[in-house]
Image (spheres, rainbow, N blue to C red):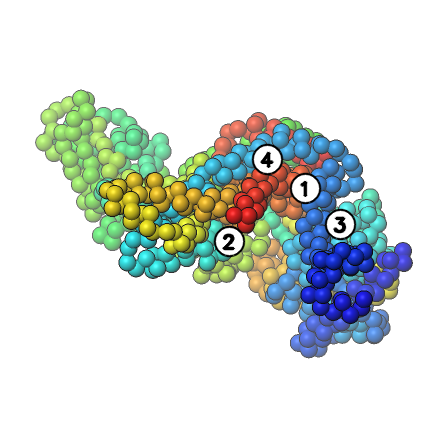
Amino acid sequence: MSRRHTAIRRLGIPAALVTAALALAACSGGGGTPAPSSIKGVDLSGQTLEISADWSGSEQKDFEKVLDGFEQATGAKVNYTSLGNNIATVLGTKVEGGNPPNIAVIPQPGLLKQLAQEGALKPLSSDVLSTVKENYSQDWIDLGSVDGTPYGVWFKGSNKSTVWYNADIYDEAGATVPKTWDDFLKQLQLVSDAGYAGISIGADVGWPLTDWFENVYLRTAGPEMYDKLSNHEIPWTDPSVTTALQTLGQLWGNSTLVEPGSAQRTFPETVTEVFGDDPKAGTVFEGDFLATNISQDTSAKVGETAKFYDFPSINGSGPTVVGGGNAAVAFKDDKATMALMKYLASPEAGEIWVKLGGFTSPNKNVDLSSYPDDTSRQIAQALVGAQTFRFDMSDLAPAAFGGTEGSGEWQVMIEFLNNPTDVEGTQQKLEQAAAAAWK
Amino acid sequence: MTASLASPAVVGADARRPRRGGRNRTIVLAIVFLAPAIVLLGALVVYPILYTLWRSFYSASGGEFVGVDNYVTMFTDPDTFTAIRNNFIWVIVAPIACTALGLVFAVLLDRIRWATAFKLIIFMPMAISMLAAGVIFRTVFQENPQVGVANAIVVAVRDAFTDTAAFPGARERPDAGVVARDGALSGAEPVMAGGSQGFPLIGIRQSEIPETAKQAAEPPHARAGEITGTVWLDLVRGGGGTNGHIDPGKKGLPGLTVQAVDSSGAVVASATTADDGTYRLTGLDGGRYTVTMPASNFTQGASGIPWLGPSLINVVVISSYIWIWAGFAMIMIASGLSALDRSLQEAARVDGATEWQVFRRITAPLLMPVLVVVFVTLIINVLKIFDLVYVIPPGESKPAANVIAVEMWNVSFGGGNNQGLGSALAILLLVLVLPSMILNVRRFRRERER
């Protein structure tokens, strides 16, 4: 115990000094926003809070503007530290060293669960929980809970059920926005008839393919089966997986619809194949972040040439979204920490970033008119209005299965893309990899 | 007593005269001088090795003792097996190739003017970081000829020998009386002279239609001994129209070759389509003919070789390594060469030895010590190869190109989170490197004794 305390003292002071200096620099840019109602009248002047997330660069600046709103309303000082891509490792080390931040915003429910089970997290106070219940649908509350205890506030959400298309090509081919899977294949055929590839698929290191599978599986097998498969309670050799892979194979195995060379194409390349100056294909599927690739790598304008539609319904499935998100979790339960949690759960906090662009809030009370353009509004609408929302399955799985280059689900799906008729063999390989990872 | 500590010379003098106090002082002094090195080596080398060894007997999370389980997994897991196999291929191919190329360059460049310029160019890849070199090779060998230089060359050479087609990639509208055979499009049924055969095509972009193309026309009237027809793009911009029918907005396709083939397979008449897509095959006898559009109308440009696919990936990665390290071998061997006693070579030449004999009997044996140093250094280096293998292969070929160091990283930090298995792999790597290390240390010692 005593050793722990000295460690805090030794590490804590210089770190606080550095981050305080950084926060001062960040503060000076803030504007005069009115105090948010969620934390009205809370005076925390003189208190310092540490918050960490994986955002850096422009995302960090935008998030710091959200924190400015809290600082101005309460007088507290909030220091942001970016933990980068290795957030799980860095956070684990900090927790072990007895020096966790007040709040961390983490991108994986698996990490949330792990930290909660280690006892590192503090449950949401009843006050915060009531704000969360006011603003979030049950799917999101469940996603932030471990064994029924709520820990997480999902501050940021993402929609991975968006299919992006080149509107010029669709117009030339006379293709329209499809609502169902069969219609989807029909429209891709029209694009292909017009001399373009219907769709460009990029295996990259495998992750885009897992997103394909998850969207199809959630629609063909339903949310209950999806949850079971996510936890490996049913094997990958289950008939529901067979159906999903066969559905996927209808498209992946159709060489007139899919642009050749999928296995070696990276994800950014698929974007330029569809929206570049000399487009080769009409459609590309991936999450809402694809809009960033379009505006950075191509001259196509999102909302004009580059549009999207929701991933088509299969066998009459309702509005369904596979996605991701970043949840704020508290490592301390003092008044200031919980006030910040409450602030992050409020629509005001989300709206600050929403207006800056590049951000989708899962908070259902965030005003849709705050989104800067139609495309981001449409993405948010699909996310908030989804009948079923499920977290990206491969992000829920142990990384050895759903997150390692060259092995596990990523690699097996690349093999399936190369040989889409081998459904049975694919299932066996997936089950083998899953069994090893869930051991 | 205290004064003697001040100068090393005095300490030396003390050591010569064996006195109990003096001897102890020497040992203390030795320890004091050695301590920083020992502490550093202990903390940075010995402790990590021992900890890794200890860690390799524990489970993924580190909480549970699993004995040799990690080592069993290592040798039974197919992924790790490929990694070990690839490491062997690397060790056999890369050092030999690098040393051989380095030797050839060094010996050849020894005898020409401007040698320094050439050496500089060959040595230059050493100045690039391995990561950057990996990115360069990955780009050069991209499958898409518009990105990868290697395939751009391949495609350019292949295309030089084939004519460019009018409408590459065009295909028939399915179920509209036209079938594809070996890339050629033919009427599904033979046509009597005096009849007509239409060709509705798809898979052509509106932007590919020549400026001169006009609205597709109905086939002209066929006189006796003629077959007529229209070749048209069976698409209306923006959709609409009936498949297989000539509707308003559908363009004729000019400049395509149409042939009449008789039952024996001989081409008896040939025609080219007009701006409205119509053609007229003349000079036919009565009888039935298959109307065909030869494949040359539609052949697509050559596509690139999948260099980065699983079957060729090791070749690409190992060549990139050779590209970088041949320069190192050359510089080492060249410096050995310049230190050589040239009189032996001169003497051999005077005695009438050919250049090949001089090289084989004189130069090569004299260079042997340098060659061994280069070779052993490269073996150690190759065993630890990581960056190139990590950067160059695309997702599809990662397992095929895997090596132990990359597998170790993936297993422990790249998502596997199994630092037990990762440690076992690290120990395997250490065991594999040890023999060459011992060899090198022995050689150094022998050289110093000489």
Local secondary structure at mark 3:
helix
Which numbered disc, 2 or 3, marks the residue closer to the eye? Answer: 2
Residue bearing the label numbered 1 = B423
- Is the same chain shared between marks 2 and 3? no
Which numbered disc, 4 or 3, marks the residue closer to the eye? Answer: 4
Task: Count residues near mark 2 (Cα–Cα under 10 Å), then give few for <14, some for 14-19, many for 20+.
Answer: some
Distance of label 1 from label 2 (alpha carbons): 24 Å
Looking at this view, is A422 or A135 the one in front? A422
Distance of label 2 from label 3 (alpha carbons): 34 Å
- Is the same chain shared between marks 4 and 3? no
The amino acid sitting under disc 2 is Leu
Q: What residue appears at the point 58 percent right and 54 percent down from the top-left corner?
A: A288
Looking at this view, is A255 or B416 the one in front? B416
For the residues labelled 1 and 3, say whether their Cβ atoms are less than 8 Å apart.
Answer: no
Q: Relative to B143, does residue A288 appear above or below in the rendering?
A: below
Which numbered disc, 1 or 3, marks the residue closer to the eye? Answer: 1
Residue B115: x and y in percent read: 32, 57
Q: What residue appears at the point 56 percent right and 27 percent down from the top-left corner?
A: A425
Residue bearing the label numbered 3 = A112
For the residues labelled 2 and 3, say whether their Cβ atoms are less than 8 Å apart.
Answer: no
Distance of label 4 from label 3 (alpha carbons): 31 Å
Local secondary structure at mark 1:
helix
Q: Which mark is residue B180?
A: none
Distance of label 1 from label 4 (alpha carbons): 13 Å
Q: What residue appears at the point 72 percent right and 74 percent down from the top-left corner?
A: A21
